[in-house]
Image (cartoon, rainbow, N blue to C red):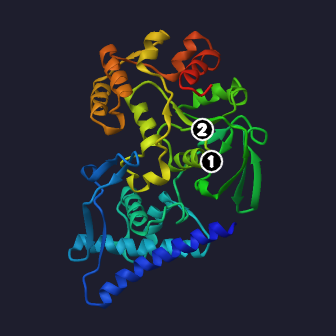
């Protein structure tokens, strides 16, 4: 384990202890203990024009022990802080799901969580208050499994020591599995020209099987639908540290546009981490409504929920550009949507031989 990683763990532990000490000091001074965090509602989310990401606004909420409900929330927070501090001290880790079940063994019934949503939200609250990510608390999601494949040589930290991996030569067809905390990775060398984030597993496999990563020196990142935090973090690092352009290749529907938006601008749920996770320079490479016409792609009709989502995106500051307004309006006029795999109607090699090269050339990447 590197010195930097140990420092992060020490800082995380100190932040947790400082939070617990602050609650203790309030009680020691005869005050009703409380904890203040930004109000985590959609109405308190703002789009930062300067940073091009979602951030929390100025409204705050207070978790105060002046009510039974508030006292329970603080009690659960204190128990969780103690658990996380002990976990860091023992150099252990756990999943968000395990934390929920572990609370059932706590000696105070009032400190136990009612459901996993409650425990997940508390961990996010602690991230905001301490300014430490859950990854540095050694908390991880139940599963991720997102992968990357491409001309990238890296060093990762494992419990068995350091390991150096080339993400083409040293991995199978499944690629290199992105760890829960990508900040433990050190980039050693690369021959990449581009990062391409791909929504679906089927398309990711098609690109790898056709050797697209080798022919065009592309790092292919599998998003697995709505991308996990680790996936967005490593994408940002690849852009910021290796100066690689990032593209996002998705289906052509409003939900996939939001997948692109979460990579580029962050999500409402993780607004407190937008500067850590979002890559505002990421470009949309996915199926465009105009592609449906130009390439005569098979389609499905837009559902009512699709139409509502598209109309909502017209009012979304992330999509208020000439490009997006034109594409979304065209899709509403067409009344159709299309998937990445629809490109196979022109043959299995069409996506790698024709579609992507043409699109990337238009975008100035080839």
Are dots 2 and 1 in contact, CB under 8 Å? Answer: yes
Residue depicted at 38% across the width and 71% down the height = 77
Spot occupied by residue 141 in the image (x, y as percentages of width and height): 51, 54
The quadrant in which the N terminus is found is bottom right
Dot 2: few (<14), some (14–19), or many (≥20) neighbours within 10 Å?
many
* Disc 1 element: loop
Q: Earlier in the sequence, mark 2 or mark 1?
A: 1
Residue 21 vs 327, above or below: the answer is below
Q: Which residue is mark 1?
A: 178
Residue 152 vs 322, above or below: the answer is below
Residue 188 vs 38, above or below: the answer is above
In screen coordinates, is 31 left or right of 237?
left
Spot occupied by residue 170 in the image (x, y as percentages of width and height): 78, 42
* Disc 2 element: strand
Question: In front here: 244 or 197?
Answer: 244
Q: Quadrant of residue 322?
A: top left
Residue depicted at 35% across the width and 31% down the height = 321
């Amino acid at each position: 384990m590197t010195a930097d990683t140990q420092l992060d763990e020490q800082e995380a532990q100190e932040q947790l202890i400082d939070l617990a000490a602050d609650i203790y000091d309030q009680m020691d001074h005869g005050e009703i203990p409380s904890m203040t965090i930004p109000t985590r509602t959609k109405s308190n989310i703002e789009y930062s024009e300067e940073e091009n990401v979602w951030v929390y606004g100025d409204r705050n909420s207070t978790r105060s022990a002046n009510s039974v409900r508030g006292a329970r929330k603080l009690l659960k927070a204190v128990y969780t802080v103690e658990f996380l501090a002990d976990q860091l001290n023992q150099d252990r880790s756990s999943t968000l799901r395990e934390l929920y079940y572990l609370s059932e063994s706590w000696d105070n019934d009032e400190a136990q969580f009612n459901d996993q949503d409650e425990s997940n939200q508390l961990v996010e609250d602690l991230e905001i208050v301490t300014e430490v990510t859950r990854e540095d608390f050694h908390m991880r999601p139940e599963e991720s499994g997102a992968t990357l494949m491409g001309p990238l040589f890296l060093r990762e930290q494992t419990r068995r020591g350091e390991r150096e991996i080339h993400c083409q030569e040293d991995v199978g067809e499944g690629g290199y599995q992105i760890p829960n905390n990508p900040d433990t990775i050190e980039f050693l060398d690369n021959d990449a020209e581009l990062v391409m984030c791909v929504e679906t597993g089927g398309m990711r496999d098609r690109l790898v099987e056709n050797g697209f990563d080798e022919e065009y020196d592309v790092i292919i990142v599998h998003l697995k639908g709505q991308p996990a935090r680790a996936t967005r973090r490593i994408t940002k690092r690849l852009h910021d540290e290796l100066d690689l352009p990032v593209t996002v290749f998705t289906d052509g529907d409003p939900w996939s546009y939001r997948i692109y938006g979460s990579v580029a601008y962050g999500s409402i749920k993780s607004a407190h981490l937008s500067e850590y996770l979002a890559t505002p320079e990421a470009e949309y490479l996915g199926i465009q409504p105009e592609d449906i016409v130009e390439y005569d792609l098979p389609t499905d009709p837009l559902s009512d929920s699709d139409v509502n989502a598209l109309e909502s995106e017209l009012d979304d500051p992330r999509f208020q550009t000439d490009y997006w307004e034109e594409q979304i309006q065209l899709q509403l006029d067409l009344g159709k949507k299309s998937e990445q795999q629809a490109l196979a109607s022109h043959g299995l090699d069409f996506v790698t031989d024709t579609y992507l090269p043409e699109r990337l050339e238009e975008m100035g990447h080839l």
